[in-house]
Image: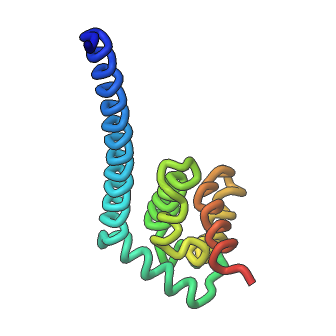
Amino acid sequence: MVDVLQVLEGATYAAFIVGAIVAIYELLSASKDRRTDILIRTNEFWCSREFEETFLKMRQAYEDNVQDFHELENRVGKLALWTQVDYLDGVASLAQTKAIDKKTILGMFGWYRMWSGLEPWISNKRKNGYPQLATAFEWLAAEDKRLNHST
């Protein structure tokens, strides 16, 4: 004869195990949804007119090998440079703090190339009162160089 208490205890354990599996699945699903949301938001800004205009000016300055921060400010504009650097640093910090996978972020953008173009301007700002400016951006650019541009 089966003891009802043992059956109830077994059912409780089974329910606990199923609940744990469902909770783990929900956490994994939420993490994937959060990553997707971050990628969509990032892409929305990168496709904005303001970002694209600045990016095109930056690309031209990079191709012209502009190394003077004053020339970069004249070509691109102070506000545009601050906006772009702060945004790129913010996105890079998501990878640096492991809020999102570094490989995902690295695959979205030419971090090392953009850093190379902005580095003269960032270096000047660091020397003149902003020593922590774009540290996550610099870190991610170094990672990009190490993984994709090493010789």
Q: Position of residue 109 (x, y in %)?
A: 48, 73
The residue drawn where x is 44% and y is 76% is 55
Residue placed most toward the observer, 49 or 144:
144
Quarter of the view holding residue 19: top left
* 97 lies above or below 9: below
For the rendered model, the colour scheme is rainbow
Task: Tell whether 120 sits left or right of 76.
Answer: right
The residue drawn where x is 45% and y is 81% is 57
Residue placed most toward the observer, 46 or 11:
11
Task: Tell whether 30 sits left or right of 151.
Answer: left
Q: Residue most toward the right?
A: 151
Q: Residue most toward the bottom?
A: 64
Q: Where is residue 119 in the image (x, y as percent from the top left)?
A: 64, 70
Residue placed most toward the observer, 22 or 96:
22
The residue drawn where x is 54% and y is 72% is 73
Q: Position of residue 51 (x, y in %)?
A: 38, 70
- Numbered circles on residues, count: 0
